[in-house]
Amino acid sequence: MWKDQQLDALRDIVVSAGREILSVYNSDQAIAVTDKADNSPLTDADRRAHRLIEDRLKNLTPDIPVLSEESEMIDFQIRRSWQRYWLVDPLDGTKEFIKRNGEFTVNIALIEQGRASMGVVHVPVSGISYLGKLGSGAWKQDGESIVAIHSSRLKPLDNLVRVVVSRSHRGELLDGIIQIIETELGETEVVSMGSSLKICLLAEGKADIYPRLAPTCEWDTAAAHAVLSAAGGEIVDIEFRPLRYNQKSELLNPYFFALADSAYPWQQLLDKPRQKY
């Protein structure tokens, strides 16, 4: 069990936001959807969760800025001076939410000097939460059950290599990566899933690699990144540099690999197709 008041507070916030989301999700009415400027979908559940999280975080830590997917965009000239801030995705996996398949999450991360240092990911439908803090560890909470989680170490030829991919984004580049892994490391299992749950699978030792060769934003990854790092894994860009936050004016992530076993020589294995990205 973690002993951290801030993690406790964050979990309370995401659970409350999850209830707001479920009030829309479990309604008999069709889910109303509008398109944002980038053509991504927006629902009343996104708005409700955003308002609750923003209010609660400002009450919890008035001195720490909040950057949410659903907040007004903050100019880089302002946020570049932030040493610490909350990075929030009130409803990650809105497409999965609209499909009502349960694969969506509430994400809150604390970013310190560009690094995701603490994060909580909550799954409203199942009630499961993933929590992580660098230097302290990572945990999975399911009801009253709380267990420490650790990413798995890769043992090629001894175990199945488990590749997790986006349910919504698949293409030639990703298929090429999967083929290389299968050719070099042996039998490969591919699991499709939505939202930040993909990264959480790595954190709890149920997957080995998540190649993401399609666009994501920083709030899509930050909370689960903190959980994965605290569990022993890492997210790196295609040059195998650790993913960092708030380093540029745009909030898009580069293409990346989430790795359960960051000590394994993945770069040597995946170098050949890299020039195609």
Image (cartoon, grey):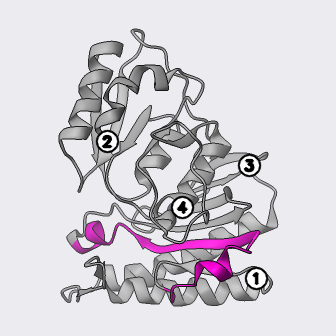
Mark 4 belongs to which amino acid?
Val
Q: Determine contact: label 3, label 1, CB under 8 Å.
A: no
Q: CA distance from mark 1 to mark 2?
A: 42 Å
Mark 1 belongs to which amino acid?
Leu
* Image location (x, y in percent) of residue 107: 53, 67
Give the structural element (helix, strand or loop) at label 2: loop
Residue 121's tag is 4
* Magenta residues, start to end: 71-98
Viewer-proximal residue among 45 and 234 = 234
59 drawn magenta: no
Mark 3 belongs to which amino acid?
Leu
First in residue order: circle 2 vs circle 3: 3
Q: Determine contact: label 4, label 1, CB under 8 Å.
A: no
First in residue order: circle 4 vs circle 3: 4
Q: Residues within 10 Å of mark 4 (few under 14, many from 20)?
A: many
| Label 3 vs label 1, nearer the camera | 3
Task: Residue under label 3, please give it.
Answer: 134
Q: Residues within 10 Å of mark 2 (few under 14, many from 20)?
A: few
Task: Residue under label 2, please give it.
Answer: 277
Furthest-top residue in view? 157
